[in-house]
Amino acid sequence: MSTSRIAPGTRMTGAQALIHALEHEGVEVMFGLPGGCILPAYDPLLESTIRHILVRHEQGAGHMAEGYAHVTGRPGVAMVTSGPAATNLVTPLMDAYMDSIPMVGITGQVPTGAIGTDAFQECDTVGITRSVTKHNELVMSADEVTLAVRQAFHIATTGRPGPTLIDLPKDVLQNETRWEWPTDEEVAASLPGYRPTMKGHPRMVKEAARLILAAERPVLYVGGGILKARAAEALRELAELTQIPVVTTLMARGAFPDDHPLCLGMPGMHGNATAITAMQKSDLLIALGARFDDRITGKVASFAPEAKVIHVDIDPAEQGKVRRPDVPIVGDCRLVIEEIVKAIRDLQAGGETQADTTAWKSRISGWREQFPLTYEPSEPGNALKPQFCLEKLRDAAPEGTIVASGVGQHQMWTSQYWQFNEPYTWVNSGGLGTMGFSIPAAIGAKIGRPDRTVWAVDGDGCFQMTAQELVTATVERIPIKVALLNNSYLGMVRQWQEMFYDERYSEVYLSTDVPDYVKWAESMGCVAIRVEAPEEVEPAIEKANAVNDRPVVVEFRVDSGEKVFPMVPAGHSNDDVLVHPTQNDRREHLR
Amino acid sequence: MSTTPAPRNHHILSVLVQNRPGVLARVASLFARRGYNIFSLAVAPAEDEGMSRITIVVDVDSAPLEQIVKQLFKLVEVVKISELDPRRSVERELLLATVRTDAETRSQVAQLVDIFEGKILAVGVEALTVSLEGHPDKLDDFEALLSGYGIVELQRTGRVALAKIDRQARLRAVDTGKGKVG
């Protein structure tokens, strides 16, 4: 936004300039917690149109901002004070950096004259956050506040999105300045080294179109960049035009509908055998906004050995970082996909035909038939199976439900068993793997999309890291729902110790009864339900879905021995995927 | 590093940056975080107001170099990166050294300085301080010869470099797809 509603030259404090600047950037809500150095910024907030959510821990503010950004595409804003508050924001900033989430952090700082003196609650915030942000800035004058805000929002939301941070000394907030709202041109001129490439190189686009038409075993390898580029529709057009099967990574779940006949689901360490094997055997990987993460490739040297690679990414540094592409295309995923679709149509209009992929399709449907996701139902009287609970949760979820998850087994099961048919309905911590992400992220998501049902799927380990934000949810009337899969363990760690450390369980048991999750949730103002038997599952979910005036926590007591399958052990080739034990008899069909 | 010659795999990057607080820390911490080694680094204001030029010598193969350049470009304050081909650029460095001398060796050292077209900056009873500006290879040779007399203290600036003027003075510009390589 380059026009200002305030007359240029109007006198105000740096703090007033900050809040007005946020309003001008279109900020409707921010998440934060006040303290000494940021206090001046909290005063003009009383007159602002911006809603502020008072969190119980600064990490919560950061993850809420992320959850908000995930579902709306707009930058999430977290405002906290200096020192420990700034350091508490480091984890969400890094999380947002890894998953390319647009987010703006605002931190208080000790007055400019006190910087460098080890003053109370002083820390080198820009130094500490330098490697966890796309860009950060210590603002040393009230006159520079509005430009710093504009730069922070511009950098966070353009190119490859990511977190930015503005560090504001207390006197900078208190000093007087005159309102100036920099134009788009002035912002661009102030950042001469920042010019993201949007359009793909025409020659590369044409080359990509040729490879796509020539491929006999192609796979569309779709990453989170599709969602950042708002490219889901363009992707669908490309997939349907070429009839090429699609795998959606953990960060891209929902970018292509799971109920689409061409959708193979999630690849990677805990992907399904079909998605993993299709990539592995393909002769052309069309990577769209994906970064060849080690959780996808397994052992890089033996990853998709026969595949040529088309790599579309807005970040030039992703090209060739892990796998050297045959056709690198730097640009915005939506624009480049549209260009590729056009190039394919042009080639077809010129008489070129697509290679026959019938044999490939029938191999894929063979794998799908033989290796569906599966688990063994629980015996009567035994603990619930987490997959069963998730299936029931999925089936009872209203249309458009948004799911946020923590990190671990429950995250993988949710990604596997949910049906993501709509983009921006899946919120999780993919790159950094931040335990405790789900509750604050779900709160941010619910603020961003109040019309939607928002479920946080959490584990007991994760829940204990950030559950205090349920107090925030209750007080601020943000009615999220939490499905707590309590298996009494750090489940994923337990699985690795069972499989790779000879069942030597080290520091991995939490407790079944302590804390009492029902009492804890109730004490935080939530409706709380404990579920222990299969027949209780559906009624509990029904009851939870009916609550809309406060948060709900449903604790499912689940089988602690249950493991996530399939699994590609870390560092192994995707050829060595471990399928569910009941499917071992047909393992050779994946060859 | 006093007697270490420039590494065989060395590449010279000339990086134009906005002269903003912390920009050197950003560049340095990027090298540290990605595990790349800096052989030498020199930084000073450039011809344009508000800009600085950083000359970085790195010791890597070309594949990691491509990644270094791309990662450097992601820093918002980095405006332009050129890889300078040593054959098509001029490189200079400054060396200061205090060398132990006595009545007998003083004239020998003075003669060396003369041959290399260096300067004598200070004369003491038991030492000489000398300076030499020139191509880093020349400085290596000079340093090796001085070391026979006993170097008390030594400081080199690290190399600075610019592309040779025309005669196809080709900056081998690195294609980053970011559209800001001149």
Image (cartoon, coloured by chain):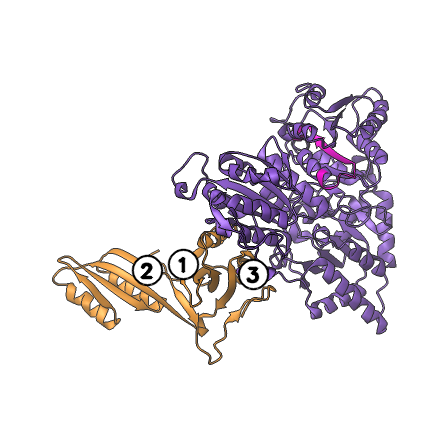
Q: Are marks 1 and 2 on the same chain?
A: yes
Looking at the rendered structure, the number of numbered marks drawn on it comes to 3
Tag 1 subunit: B
Badge 1: few (under 14), some or many (20 or more) residues near its Cα, within 10 Å?
some
Of A167 and A355, nearer the camera is A167
Label the orange chain with its letter.
Answer: B
| B64 relative to A204, above or below | above
Give x and y (percent) for residue A180.
54, 54
Which residue is at a point 58% across and 64% down the rendered structure image?
A: B176
What type is the residue that disc 2 sits on? Arg
SS at mark 1?
strand
Which residue position is annotated with label 3?
Answer: A186
Please identify, in this view, whether the residue under mark 3 or under mark 2 is nearer the observer: 3
Q: Is residue A132 visible?
A: no
| Badge 3 amino acid | Glu
* Marking on residue B156: 2
Numbered range of the magenta stretch: A447-463
Give me the chain that's purple. Answer: A
Q: Quadrant of residue A333?
A: bottom right
Q: Position of residue A518 (x, y in %)?
A: 72, 20
Alpha-carbon distance for marks 3 and 1? Answer: 35 Å
Q: What is the three-letter code of the residue carrying label 1?
A: Ser
Task: Residue A526: tell me if it is visible.
Answer: yes
Q: Measured from the top left, where is residue A79 in percent x and y?
A: 57, 40
Mark 1 and mark 2: Cα distance apart in space: 10 Å
According to the picture, the residue beneath numbered tag 1 turns out to be B40
The reply to whether label 3 and label 2 mark residues of one chain is no
Badge 2 marks a residue whose secondary structure is strand
Q: Earlier in the sequence, mark 1 or mark 2?
A: 1
